[in-house]
Image (cartoon, coloured by chain):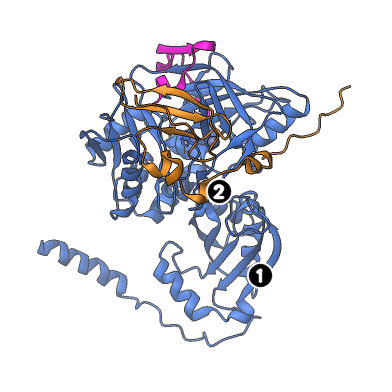
Chain colours: A orange, B blue
């Protein structure tokens, strides 16, 4: 496969992991961002696979990820006994 | 005719001309989703799609749009493919009355043929996963029947829940999972997390067509989906015991994924283009660790495209939303004739009802909002007379245009509950709700000039049949 991109299309994080590679060798890889978990196939259109073409609407920042609310929220631990 | 698995239903669709096998090589993205999206843009009675030549894969079989037309929905229920929508809903309601029908336990589940366990689990090697919409955070399982049990009452068959939830694949053995707060699995998870325990879960993919319908159906907490599937199929639902969790799962599934929702953990999920026609996501959701995958030899991966309606999702959850509301309303108000709750899973509902006395229709509208499903949906209710077909939108528009005096007939109630995904809610989960009473006022409500309605002539029904005969004979 062609060289792994250096940044996440969605959040620009630079740790990218390979989750899977095409059963037909060398056709595509499935990659994942180590921070925002964005997952994409290397053969997807540029609007999904390249930082410079990724839509602003869907971009995430570190603050977006840190401040994301929990759904559902973790309930308080019930006291036992 | 009851189908015991997805494969036999795909064969039936094929025989009825309702399955299109696409033999040309396609790209996993954007072709698979775009083709399924397009089924909703080519008119009535679109077929299911079957792909087995997908670039980069050697062994992929993908079925989409399986329920994605009225013809396919009718065939799923074992009805003739041309059965009109209103008749499909009526037949669905009639079969409902047979509930509960005990399931039939079978031993030889075909998904016992293959399995991966523990560190060997790799979902990508079993499922040809792919993205649906541009802004989706990843690849999703969106047509699974997910089984969970009440951790405080694990032997209670009725409280074992089967539901459909969105599930993002975030690793070879990891999933992010969205339990909608109003749904049963959210209650199960809460009970487990309150005592710091993981919640076992079984995720079944590629099911018989009635299983997919009941998994998406709003039912009471202690009603069993398998017993409802039996009623709708007209035959006991075949179930089998999942090897790791011991849960009851469909006998005919293509793939059975078992694991746990890890207690008190949340991870970033989404977004995902939802049935509302809008994305939701960027929130921290519960996480599943997969410990075992069982699968049929040559599994078929079933997926569902959803986005701007109409899509397969609207066919899948249309009738199954109408019928529970109809049953719950009729239990108290036998005057209710029919319920059309097919718009965005019942965010908007059209109800036809006879009137007991003046003001009655508005009470029916308020009751619809306070049914279990109504609490999370039913933001707009249109009430029409008993002789207006709520599935016939031109008739409904006529009733709205001719019968409504907005000042008295439109009622808006502020600050009510709705699911958080509702795009117009503000804040998320809170909305105003509206009743539009397009019924004819009856005493003591004496408003308007409705004393001389022009009804169909008594002879019209006979002439309609005669015209149809003459037209048919001419061909
Ligand atoms: Zn990222």
Same-chain status of marks 2 and 1: yes
- Image coordinates of residue B272 in percent, x first then y, are 51, 43
Residue at 58% x, 55% y is B330
Number of on-image labels: 2
Q: Earlier in the sequence, mark 2 or mark 1?
A: 2
Q: Nearer the viewer, residue B180 or B450?
A: B180
In the picture, residue B454 is in which quadrant? bottom left
| Residue at the spot 20% in from the left edge and 35% down from the top edge | B24
Q: Chain of mark 2?
A: B
The percent position of residue B151, horizontal first and vertical second, equals 70, 25
* Disc 1, SS: strand
Residue named by callout 1: B412
Q: Quadrant of the N terminus of chain B?
A: top left
Where in the figure is residue B242, as x and y percent of width and height?
Answer: 53, 17
Kindly indicate the quadrant of the structure image that contains residue B356.
Answer: bottom right
Q: Which residues are magenta?
A: B100-127
In the rendered view, does B176 fall on the left or right side of B313? right
Residue at 71% across / 25% down in the picture? B153
Numbered disc 1: what chain? B
- Give the quadrant of residue B436: bottom right
Q: Which quarter is ligand 1 in? A: top right
**In the drawing, what numbered circle is on residue B324?**
2
Relative placement, left or right, of B414 versus B248 is: right
The front one of B107 and A21 is: A21
Q: Is residue B22 left or right of residue B178?
A: left
Residue B195, placed above or below residue B314: above
């Amino acid at each position: 496969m062609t060289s792994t991109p250096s940044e996440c299309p969605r959040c620009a994080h630079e740790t990218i992991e390979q989750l899977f590679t095409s059963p037909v060798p060398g056709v595509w890889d499935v990659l994942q961002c180590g921070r925002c978990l964005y997952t994409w196939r290397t053969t997807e259109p540029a609007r999904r696979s390249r930082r410079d073409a990724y839509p602003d609407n869907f971009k995430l920042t570190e603050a977006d990820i840190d401040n994301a609310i929990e759904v559902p929220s973790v309930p308080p631990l019930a006291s036992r006994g | 005719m009851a189908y015991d698995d997805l494969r036999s239903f795909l064969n039936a669709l094929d025989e009825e001309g309702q399955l299109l096998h696409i033999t040309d090589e396609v790209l996993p993205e954007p072709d698979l989703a775009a083709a399924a999206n397009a089924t909703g843009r080519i008119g009535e009675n679109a077929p299911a799609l079957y792909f087995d030549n997908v670039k980069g894969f050697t062994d992929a079989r993908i079925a989409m749009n399986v329920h994605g037309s009225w013809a396919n929905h009718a065939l799923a229920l074992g009805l003739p493919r041309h059965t009109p929508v209103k008749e499909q809903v009526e037949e669905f309601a009639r079969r409902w009355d047979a509930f509960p029908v005990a399931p039939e336990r079978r031993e030889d589940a075909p998904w016992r043929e293959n399995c991966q366990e523990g560190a060997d689990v790799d979902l990508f090697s079993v499922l040809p996963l792919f993205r649906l919409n541009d802004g989706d955070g990843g690849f999703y399982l969106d047509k699974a029947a997910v089984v969970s049990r009440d951790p405080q009452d694990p032997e209670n068959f009725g409280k074992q829940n089967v539901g459909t939830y969105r599930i993002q694949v975030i690793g070879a053995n990891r999933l992010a999972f969205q339990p909608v707060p109003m749904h049963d699995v959210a209650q199960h998870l809460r009970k487990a997390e309150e005592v710091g325990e993981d919640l076992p879960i079984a995720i079944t993919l590629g099911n018989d067509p009635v299983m997919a319908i009941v998994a998406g159906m709003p039912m009471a907490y202690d009603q069993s989906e398998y017993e409802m599937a039996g009623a709708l199929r007209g035959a006991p639902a075949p179930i089998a015991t999942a090897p790791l969790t011991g849960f009851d799962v469909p006998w005919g599934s293509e793939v059975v994924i078992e694991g746990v929702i890890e207690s008190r953990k949340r991870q970033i999920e989404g977004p995902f283009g939802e049935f509302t026609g809008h994305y939701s996501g960027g929130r921290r959701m519960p996480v599943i660790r997969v410990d075992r995958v069982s699968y049929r030899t040559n599994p078929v991966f079933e997926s569902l495209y959803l986005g701007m309606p109409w899509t397969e999702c609207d066919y899948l959850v249309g009738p199954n939303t109408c019928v529970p509301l109809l049953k719950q309303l009729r239990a108290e108000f036998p005057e209710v004739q029919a319920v059309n709750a097919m718009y965005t899973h019942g965010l908007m509902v059209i109800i036809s009802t006879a009137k007991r006395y003046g003001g009655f229709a508005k009470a029916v509208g308020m009751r619809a909002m306070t049914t279990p499903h109504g609490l999370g949906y039913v933001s707009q209710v249109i009430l029409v007379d008993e002789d207006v077909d709520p599935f016939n939108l031109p008739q409904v528009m006529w009733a709205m245009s001719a019968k409504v005096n907005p000042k008295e007939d439109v009622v808006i109630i502020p600050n009510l509950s709705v699911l958080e995904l509702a795009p117009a809610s503000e804040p998320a989960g809170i909305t105003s709700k509206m009743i539009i009473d397009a019924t004819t006022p009856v005493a003591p409500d004496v408003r308007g000039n409705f004393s001389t309605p022009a009804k169909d002539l008594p002879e019209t029904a006979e002439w309609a049949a005669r015209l149809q005969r003459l037209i048919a004979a001419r061909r």
